[in-house]
Image: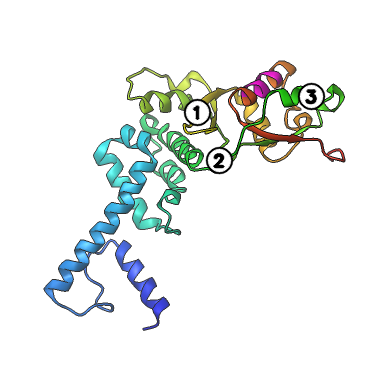
């Protein structure tokens, strides 16, 4: 058997719902059968542990048995594409969305999205923050044309429900009554030094920060925001070290 075919057969057998030894790969025998089951269980346990560590709030919301059942199914349907376990679980929020459609669990997929963004911010590259006084040196006539480079850890989150409040309460292990019809919530995530910050963000400002991340000028990214919200959003980014550099392009954006 060619190595590539062997590896594919081995991986498929590991994640199959059938726990029996793949006879095409190993000789029959009780010792091989036992070794295979132990190895297979260890692989499943490691992947489920990786999911539990990546989605701690979801784990808390679903409970041990509920999370384990969904995680086991996810492992079978979504084998890892990378040996780096911190990258495993990207599709878990949408996996949950397809399966948790009861009103009592409808908020869990958005909590999973926030768990995942938190993890990505935590493991993002380091970068020094811009001195807030640097923007003060930009001529007022040029300020709207300025493009900002944001910290690699910056992520934005927007949900039509109060998912940020739900996530934060469960992250802290608090019991708190939160009504799902309380309205949309947004957050800015970043890790300027060691700790990831999850900061409240006006829902309308989410698209603006995403535009800044994409390289748009302040004028273009914030075109839909009232002036006071533009000021508030930029002040938040500066205050929390989310901006690492700024420059004025030679030509205006189209």
Whole-number angstrom distance, CA of label 1 to CA of label 3 = 28 Å
Task: Tell me the residue that label 2 is attached to.
Answer: 126
| Helix, strand or loop for disc 3 | loop
The circle on residue 197 is 1
Quarter occupied by the C terminus: top right
Quarter occupied by the N terminus: bottom left
> Measured from the top left, where is residue 72 in percent x and y?
30, 51
| Helix, strand or loop for disc 2 | loop
User: Magenta stretch: residue 154 in it?
Assistant: no
Q: Residue at x 77, y 34 (%)?
A: 217
Q: Which callout, 1 or 2, points to the residue nearer the camera?
A: 2
**Mark 1 touching mark 3, by CB under 8 A?**
no
Q: Residue at x 49, y 42 (%)?
A: 120
Q: Between disc 3 and disc 2, whose residue precedes? A: 2
Structural crowding at the residue carrying mark 2, measured as other residues with C-alpha within 10 Å and reported as few (<14), some (14–19) or many (≥20): some
Whole-number angstrom distance, CA of label 1 to CA of label 2 = 14 Å
Q: Residue at x 27, y 35 (%)?
A: 63
Q: Quadrant of residue 174?
A: top left
| Magenta stretch in the rendered image | 231-236
> 88 above or below 233?
below
**Mark 3 touching mark 2, by CB under 8 A?**
no
Furthest-left residue in this view: 30
* Left or right: residue 145 compared with residue 115: right
Q: Between disc 1 and disc 3, whose residue precedes? A: 3
Structural crowding at the residue carrying mark 3, measured as other residues with C-alpha within 10 Å and reported as few (<14), some (14–19) or many (≥20): few
Q: Quadrant of residue 148?
A: top right
| Helix, strand or loop for disc 1 | strand
> Measured from the top left, where is residue 225 in percent x and y?
72, 23
Task: Tell me the residue that label 3 is attached to.
Answer: 137
Whole-number angstrom distance, CA of label 3 to CA of label 2 = 25 Å
> Measured from the top left, where is residue 116 in percent x and y?
46, 40
Q: Quadrant of residue 41?
A: bottom left
């Amino acid at each position: 058997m060619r190595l590539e075919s062997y590896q594919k057969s081995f991986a498929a057998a590991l994640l199959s719902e059938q726990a029996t030894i793949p006879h095409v790969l190993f000789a029959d025998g009780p010792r091989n059968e036992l070794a295979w089951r132990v190895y297979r269980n260890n692989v499943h346990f490691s992947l489920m542990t990786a999911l539990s560590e990546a989605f701690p709030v979801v784990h808390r919301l679903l409970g041990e048995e509920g999370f384990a059942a969904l995680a086991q199914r996810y492992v079978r349907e979504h084998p890892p594409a990378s040996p780096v376990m911190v990258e495993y679980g990207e599709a878990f929020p949408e996996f949950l969305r397809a399966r948790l459609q009861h009103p009592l669990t409808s908020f869990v997929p958005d909590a999973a999205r926030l768990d995942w963004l938190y993890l990505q911010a935590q493991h993002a590259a380091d970068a020094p923050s811009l001195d807030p006084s640097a923007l003060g040196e930009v001529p007022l006539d040029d300020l709207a044309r300025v493009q900002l480079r944001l910290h690699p850890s910056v992520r934005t989150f927007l949900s039509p429900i109060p998912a940020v409040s739900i996530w934060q309460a469960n992250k802290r292990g608090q019991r708190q009554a939160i009504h799902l019809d309380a309205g949309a919530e947004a957050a800015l995530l970043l890790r300027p030094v060691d700790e990831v910050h999850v900061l409240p963000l006006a829902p309308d400002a989410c698209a603006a920060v995403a535009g800044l991340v994409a390289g748009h000028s302040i004028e273009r990214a914030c075109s839909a925001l009232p002036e006071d919200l533009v000021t508030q959003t930029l002040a938040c980014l500066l205050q929390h070290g989310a901006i690492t550099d700024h420059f004025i392009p030679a030509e205006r954006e189209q």
